[in-house]
Amino acid sequence: MKNIIYSIAILFITLGYGCHNSDGYLSISATDTNSDFKFEAKYAENKTGKLEKFLDSALNNELPLDQNIDLFINLNGSDKFNLKAKKGWLVIDFDKRNSSLAGYMKVKKLTEGIRQELTE
């Protein structure tokens, strides 16, 4: 009976440790409709620094992805997108109705770069 209790305790400790240290977790989704484009990434928190460096370089702007942020990023005057982020999570919303094709292509290219950075 003691061995069963110890075995169950070790199982729960192991499962708990594995759930809190999932460095390989990655979920990326993109929804592209006639009116808007939405990109969402859920990733291991330890990749936040790498993603932050990529976005800082791509957007020429310093974004603190380790904090809760919700802001609009201006691409080229009239085109902008909403970026929401915190450690391990990033969402980009782009309104295609009020933007140019060039702005849409920039956002698509940016999200492909994000996808590439997170899958490396």
Image (tube, rainbow, N blue to C red):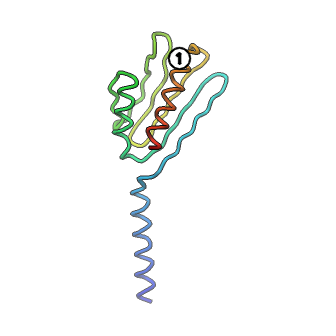
Residue sitting at x 41%, y 69%: 14
For badge 1, the amino acid type reads: Gly
Q: Which residue is drawn at 55% across and 21% down?
A: 105
Among all residues in the image, which is located at the extreme bottom?
A: 1
- Name which residue lies at 39% across and 38% down: 86
Going 66% across and 27% down the picture, which residue do you hit?
Answer: 33
In the image, farthest residue toward the right? 34
Q: Where is residue 57 in the image (x, y as percent from the top left)?
A: 36, 26
Q: Quarter of the image for the N terminus: give it.
A: bottom left
Residue 56: x, y in percent?
Answer: 35, 27
Give above or below for 80 relative to 63. Answer: above
Pick the front one: 117 or 34: 117
Q: How many labels does the image show?
A: 1
47 vs 100, left or right, is left
Mark 1, residue position: 103
Please, what secondary structure does the residue beneath circle 1 have? helix
- Residue 89 screen position, x and y as percent: 44, 40
The vertical placement of 104 against 65, above or below, is above
Q: Where is residue 50 in the image (x, y as percent from the top left)?
A: 36, 38
- Image height of 72 relative to 19, above or below: above
For the C terminus, give its image quadrant.
top left
Q: How crowded is mark 1: few (under 14 residues within 10 Å), some or many (20 or more)?
A: many
**Residue 16, quarter of picture:** bottom left
